[in-house]
Structures are given as C-alpha cells and as structure tokens.
Image (cartoon, rainbow, N blue to C red):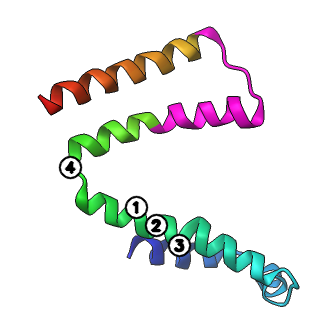
Amino acid sequence: MAFFSLCLILFLFADKTEAVAVVTSSDIGWFLLLGIVGAGISFIFYVIGIRRTAPTTASMVAMVEPVTASLFGVLIIGDHLTSIQLIGMMVILVTITVLSVKQSD
C-alpha cells in the first residue's frame, strides 16, 4: 500500500512528456529491468524479511546500513573518510557485535 501510494504521489509531480518518451524509447527493456530488479524484487525481499525478522535484529541490521554504504563509497567509488568517520564506523560495528553476542546467549 505504501509503495502504491508513493507511486501515485510521484505521478503528480512527474513530467508527463518525459514519461511518454521513456515508454517510446528504444531502451525500454533497460528501464523495465532497472525497475523490476532495482525496486520490485528488493521491495518484495524487504517485506518478506520484515515479517520474519525480530524487531531487535532488524534494528541492529539497520545500524549497519550506513557502514556498508560508507564502505561501498570507499571501496568502489574511491571516497576518502576522515578519522572521526572511521572511528564512528568502528563504534557501530563493535556495538552491533557486542549486542548480537549478548542476544544469542
């Protein structure tokens, strides 16, 4: 329901001529692949995962998201992190590790 509502809201702000140009483009297959793989499948996995995951585990995984995004930026894109950002990443990883070890006991 949330995804459908977002699509309706975005449709109000979309440039209609550009939307028609996408449909008539020769790259329509790439647009569909990007939409299905990039949004559709990931959203389905998200909903399935939310239903099967305990709230405490979900909150710990959510804390790791900025760390993985930062690592992606460093390893793939070549960004550079400051020392305070590296310390922050270490604090998050240590905290999550300690909490998950305590939770499994």
Q: Give the class, few, some or many, for how many residues have Cα within 10 Å of label 2's Cα (few <14, many ≥20).
A: some
Question: Measured along the vertical axis of the image, is residue 57 above or below residue 105?
Answer: below
Q: Earlier in the sequence, mark 1 or mark 4?
A: 1
Q: Disc 2 marks which amino acid? A: Phe
Q: Disc 3 marks which amino acid? A: Gly
Q: Report the residue marked by disc 1.
A: 46
Name the secondary structure under disc 1.
helix
**Quadrant housing residue 23:** bottom right
> Would you say residue 75 sits in the magenta stretch?
yes
Q: Earlier in the sequence, mark 4 or mark 2?
A: 2
Q: Can you give x and y, in whole percent of width and height, for residue 27 in the image?
A: 84, 80
| Residue drawn at the location 46% of the way across and 17% of the way down | 90
Question: Measured along the vertical axis of the image, is residue 51 above or below residue 81?
Answer: below
**Quadrant housing residue 47:** bottom left
- Specify whether residue 15 is in view: no
How far is mark 4 from mark 2, CA to CA? 18 Å
Q: What main secondary structure does the magenta stretch of the protein show? A: helix
Q: Can you give x and y, in whole percent of width and height, for residue 50 in the image?
A: 30, 58
Q: Report the residue marked by disc 2.
A: 43
- Specify whether residue 26 is in view: yes
Please provide the residue range marked out in magenta. 65-83
Q: Earlier in the sequence, mark 3 or mark 4?
A: 3
Q: Disc 4 marks which amino acid? A: Ala
Task: Give yes or no for contact between labels 2 and 1 (Cβ–Cβ under 8 Å).
Answer: yes
Q: Report the residue marked by disc 3.
A: 40
Q: Report the residue marked by disc 4.
A: 54
Task: Give yes or no for contact between labels 1 and 4 (Cβ–Cβ under 8 Å).
Answer: no
